[in-house]
């Protein structure tokens, strides 16, 4: 009886073990497309390293997003309903921006950056 049990067990386990050893196809790689956006205030501008740090959040939940800015990324300034191109060096800490970006193995890379010029608010006296 032991021999029959052993053969039955082997007949059940062998196909499962062989199937587990078969290589599987790698998942399809999607092209990198903008998949996220951030809106917030610039914390740090590093022109040499071509990076930005943007502080964003809701309420007390704040986060800092570090973006790499390649040379070909369009950076625009929205003023009076028109968008004018500007350089990375013209952005300053405290400026409010909206950026679309994507993830890469080296970090987040910006695809577009739009600076919003806020109208100054005057308090009535």
Image (cartoon, helix red, strand yellow):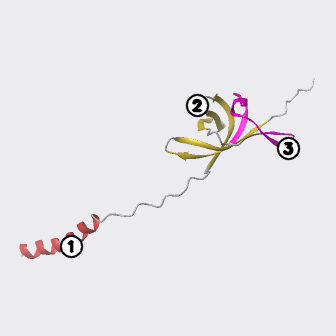
The residue that label 2 is drawn on is: 49
The percent position of residue 30, horizontal first and vertical second, equals 53, 58
Q: Is residue 121 above or below residue 81?
A: above
The percent position of residue 69, horizontal first and vertical second, equals 62, 38
Task: Look at the numbered disc 2 and give the secondary structure of its residue.
Answer: loop
Residue 48: quadrant of the picture: top right
Looking at the rendered image, the quarter that the N terminus falls into is: bottom left
The percent position of residue 84, horizontal first and vertical second, equals 80, 40
The residues bearing labels 3 and 1 have C-alpha atoms spaced at a distance of 72 Å
Tag in front: 3 or 1: 3
Residue 55: quadrant of the picture: top right
Q: Residues within 10 Å of mark 3 (few under 14, many from 20)?
A: few
**Any mark on residue 37, and which?**
none
Using the image as rendered, state which of residue 85 and residue 109 is in the foreground: 85
Q: Earlier in the sequence, mark 1 or mark 2?
A: 1
Question: What span is in magenta?
Answer: 77-98
The residue that label 1 is drawn on is: 12
Q: Residue at x 69, y 33 (%)?
A: 88
Q: How many marks?
A: 3
Q: Residue at x 41, y 60 (%)?
A: 26
Tag in front: 3 or 2: 2
The residue that label 3 is drawn on is: 81
- Does the magenta run of residues contain 87? yes
- Residue 48 horizontal side relative to residue 29, left or right: right
């Amino acid at each position: 009886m032991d021999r029959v049990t052993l053969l039955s067990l082997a007949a059940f386990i062998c196909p499962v073990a062989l199937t587990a050893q078969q290589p599987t196809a790698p998942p399809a790689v999607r092209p990198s497309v903008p998949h996220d956006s951030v809106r917030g205030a610039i914390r740090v501008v590093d022109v040499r390293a071509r990076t930005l740090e943007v502080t964003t959040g809701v309420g007390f939940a704040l986060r800092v997003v570090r973006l790499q800015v390649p040379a070909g990324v369009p950076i625009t300034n929205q003023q009076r309903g028109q968008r004018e191109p500007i350089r990375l060096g013209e952005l300053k800490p405290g400026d409010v921006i909206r950026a679309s970006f994507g993830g890469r193995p080296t970090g987040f890379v910006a695809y577009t950056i739009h600076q919003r010029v806020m109208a100054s608010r005057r308090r009535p006296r």
